[in-house]
């Protein structure tokens, strides 16, 4: 175990207790009793609650590496590592950013092979959102997300008008919606007289395909060929747009994944699909979107993304971008009467206090796992954000 059993969610506690009952040995995390008389040791003792604030000797075991930008700090670290071959620390890289890896490559160091969050991710949201056009009742929030995408198979000005309309009057296809639509197409036809690049017929066809299509009861199923149609449409649109905007690699990823969904659907024996089955198919193709632009190279530095992923002590640790923000919200998902009812069924739930205790342990864990030197890298600006 890395985390203490009592801090884990109840279902994990129940599983491990059951395993113990079957004779399986569950080894708890080791006690944090090694606190050397160094700056790092004093910091570890302070986090363990064994001592209060302590004066530091500046002995080099606890280093705050500050800089204006993460790119500057990445270049500095890469140069430092190249000039000191015996310095081979482990890295904790919380954000799946390639900033540090790019700095290593530029300096001639082995690539870490980090899988970043794909640049195509905002575009790939279309894969998850377009199935909502198949169902009734319509989910207006999903439609709002669709028309707000940076790249979507719908003319930008029309999408903006729809978004404004839904913000003022929730729901779709009402009387005010039709007024907005008539006004938009009247203005579009006037503009098309002066701008030959505007294809009014194509824009009307886009609107009809998404908003005037046949819909199916969300509790039932949808014919498979209807699903194939919308993803085939997305594939053709992405390929066509890519030819016009060849500098956007996200469209290539979107086209390939839409095509994969069509191919997968065609291999299925089922003639109809439920909403859950359709979501699983889309997720199967959508999830592998993170890309590995460089393979991990021989001699690269060990690294982890999660603070609680260190399963054994490390001699030296560099905590990259030591700037993690707090969660956006931290309230209970359950009302008191719901929690009491579940408690009667012997289903205890983790409270926000329990979740916070686990999060606190995980954040302190890398400090306790470091034996000789801890370097906290603290930029003022990371990924362009203060």
Image (cartoon, rainbow, N blue to C red):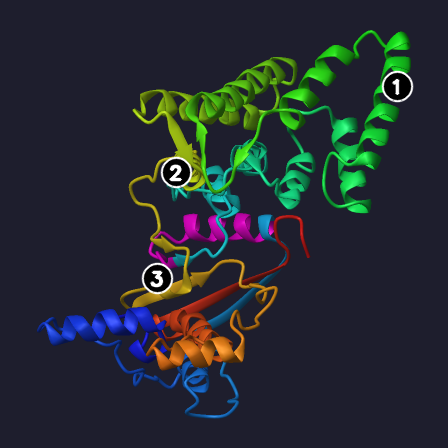
The answer to whether residue 40 is above or below residue 110 is: below
Badge 2 is on which residue?
A: 277
Res. 186 mark: 1
Q: Nearer the viewer, residue 46 or 166?
A: 166
Q: Looking at the image, is mark 1 or mark 3 nearer the viewer?
A: 1
Q: Indicate which disc, 1 or 3, sits on the residue closer to the N terminus.
A: 1
Q: Nearer the viewer, residue 173 or 353?
A: 173
The answer to whether residue 205 is above or below residue 118 is: above
Q: Where residue 381 sits in the image (x, y, percent)?
A: 65, 55
Q: Where residue 240 sits in the image (x, y, percent)?
A: 60, 14
- Element at badge 3? helix
Q: Where residue 1 sits in the image (x, y, percent)?
A: 25, 70
Res. 309 mark: 3
Q: Indicate which disc, 2 or 3, sits on the residue closer to the N terminus.
A: 2
The range drawn in magenta is 72-90
- Image quarter of residue 197: top right
Residue plotted at (89% across, 20% down): 187
Q: Is residue 377 left or right of residue 272?
A: right
Q: Nearer the viewer, residue 130 or 152?
A: 130
- Image quarter of residue 189: top right
Q: Nearer the viewer, residue 21 or 133?
A: 133
- For the C terminus, give its image quadrant: bottom right
Residue plotted at (74% across, 11% down): 201
């Amino acid at each position: 175990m890395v985390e203490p059993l009592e801090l884990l969610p109840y279902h994990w506690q129940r599983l491990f207790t059951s395993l113990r009952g079957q004779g399986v040995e569950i080894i708890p995390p080791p006690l944090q009793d090694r606190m050397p008389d160094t700056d790092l040791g004093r910091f570890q003792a302070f986090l363990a609650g064994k001592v209060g604030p302590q004066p530091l000797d500046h002995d080099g075991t606890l280093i705050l590496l500050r800089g204006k930008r993460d790119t500057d700090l990445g270049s500095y670290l890469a140069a430092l590592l190249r000039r000191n071959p015996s310095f081979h620390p482990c890295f904790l890289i919380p954000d799946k950013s390639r900033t540090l890896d790019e700095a290593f490559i530029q300096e001639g160091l082995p690539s870490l092979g980090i899988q970043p969050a794909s640049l195509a991710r905002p575009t790939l949201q279309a894969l998850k959102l377009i199935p909502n056009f198949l169902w009734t009742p319509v989910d207006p929030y999903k439609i709002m997300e669709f028309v707000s995408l940076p790249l979507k198979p719908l003319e930008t000005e029309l999408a903006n008008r729809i978004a404004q309309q839904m913000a003022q009057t929730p729901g779709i296809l009402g009387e005010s919606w039709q007024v907005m639509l008539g006004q938009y197409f009247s203005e579009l036809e006037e503009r098309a007289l002066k701008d030959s690049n505007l294809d009014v017929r194509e824009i009307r066809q886009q609107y009809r395909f998404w908003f005037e299509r046949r819909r199916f009861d969300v509790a039932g199923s949808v014919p498979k060929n209807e699903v194939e149609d919308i993803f085939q449409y997305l594939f053709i649109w992405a390929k066509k747009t890519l030819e016009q905007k060849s500098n956007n690699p996200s469209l290539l990823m979107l086209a390939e994944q839409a095509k994969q969904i069509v191919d997968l659907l065609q291999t299925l024996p089922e003639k109809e699909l439920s909403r859950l089955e359709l979501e699983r198919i889309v997720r199967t193709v959508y999830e592998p979107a993170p890309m590995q632009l460089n393979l991990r190279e021989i001699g690269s530095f060990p690294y982890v993304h999660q603070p609680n992923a260190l399963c054994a002590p490390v001699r030296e640790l560099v905590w990259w971008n030591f700037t993690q923000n707090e969660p956006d919200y931290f309230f209970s998902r359950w009302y008191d009467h719901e929690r009491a009812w579940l408690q009667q069924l012997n289903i205890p739930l983790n409270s926000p206090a329990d979740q916070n205790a686990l999060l606190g342990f995980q954040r302190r864990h890398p400090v306790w796992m470091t034996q000789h030197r801890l370097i906290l890298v603290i930029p003022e600006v990371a990924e362009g954000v203060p």
